[in-house]
Image: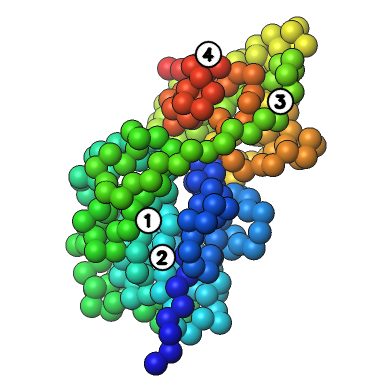
Amino acid sequence: MQTETMIDLMYVHSPITYSIGRHLHDNGYLKNTPLVVCGRNTPWPGAHIVVEDDGIWEMDRVGNFLESICQGLQGHDNFGLNLYVPHSGYLAGKLLKLAGVVRKVFYIEEGDAAYDTVNVTQAWPSREVDVDALVAMLEARGIMETLKIDRAGLQEINSMKSFFFDASSAQYGGAFCISPQAFTLLSNVTVLELERIEIIPEGENIWLCMLPNIINLHAVHAKNKPLLDKMLYGVIMMLRTQSAVLADQGGSLVIKFHPSDDVHLHPDFKNEMYRYGTAYQEFFEMNGFAMGFESSLYNFSKFVVINPSSAVRYIKQLQGADKFIGIKLD
């Protein structure tokens, strides 16, 4: 009988998942053949698969995500997967639970979701899918066969509960985070100590401004365009003020968009914001700094965060509250 090859499949799609993923990868936590999947323009220093994202509830995008993984698995005839993923709350998570090749699921911390016990105790709202269309798509792309998805279970996917973090699943293997306050209701949780990254020389005054999730703002306030316009104007005025103050102090401003905004917003819109400071990616590239890690691991002089964000937690934990400046639009 052919021996099963175990593969550690890790999906990262944000600075915090990248940081934890790099730590796991570089420090021997992954014991099997690694397969790294990167979404939302997340970088990786070695071989990896590039995807847009996990597809959320959009069938075609979920198909793209899973098909890319299947292509990365080519050449392995008899394999099992250990998954290292931010969550299992959407359609791809449901499908992977039905995949016969999946052995264990490990969760890697993903922002505020890991600190909210509701995500463990209550089912996540699911969107119904056209099962016949889903089956046809999975078969046409070779996903059904490669991942050995359970056909009977697939017929019941709309009644299948979806948990962001499913501790009751027989596949659950553990979780990784950077704070004891994360995943408090899960078992087998490993708290990692990530090293801070010194990139700003002593005496230099460089502030990082982390913009709000503008796409989400638009979705929430789409029916109130005057309010939305007022908020966006407020963002521009804040950037203009920060830039002027720092210039007077001999400092400079670095501007960072939310990961989803960075992917989907029009370049012209982003360039309007970059008039008041250096784009985050440009700042790292022109200085040759290692990019991709959680921003609060870098020693910026100050961190300005507009609107509530998981970044606040990380800044206070990793850099100290004295470096944090919070601004609310509303």
Check disc 4 and report the residue beneath it.
Answer: 322
Q: Residue at x 42, y 69 (%)?
A: 81
Marks 3 & 1, CB-CB < 8 Å contact:
no
Q: Earlier in the sequence, mark 1 or mark 2?
A: 2
The amino acid type, in three-letter code, at marker 4 is Asp
Local crowd at mark 4 within 10 Å, few (<14), some, or many (≥20)?
A: few
* Residue 139: x %, y % from top left: 41, 80
Name which of mark 1 and mark 4 comes first in the sequence: 1
CA separation, marks 3 and 1? 34 Å
Rendered residue at 34%/46% (across/down): 189
> Closer to the N terminus: mark 2 or mark 4?
2
Q: Nearer the viewer, residue 140 or 66?
A: 66
Q: Which residue is mark 2?
A: 82
Q: Position of residue 67 (x, y in %)?
A: 50, 71
Q: Residue furthest right?
A: 286
Res. 82 visible in picture = yes
What residue would you read off at disc 3?
A: 200
Identity of the amino acid at label 3?
A: Ile
Disc 1 residue type (three-letter): Phe
Identify which residue, 321 or 53, lies in the foreground: 321
- Quadrant of residue 178 within the rendered picture: top left
Q: CA distance from mark 3 to mark 4?
A: 17 Å
Kindly indicate the quadrant of the structure image that contains residue 156.
bottom left
Check the image and name the residue furthest to the bottom.
1
Percent x, y of residue 267: 68, 40
The residue at 57%/21% (across/down) is: 303
Q: Which residue is mark 1?
A: 106
Task: Look at label 2 and name its amino acid.
Answer: Asn
1 and 4 marks in contact (CB < 8 Å): no
Contact (Cβ within 8 Å) of mark 3 with mark 2 = no
Q: Say whether disc 3 or disc 2 marks the residue closer to the N-terminus.
A: 2
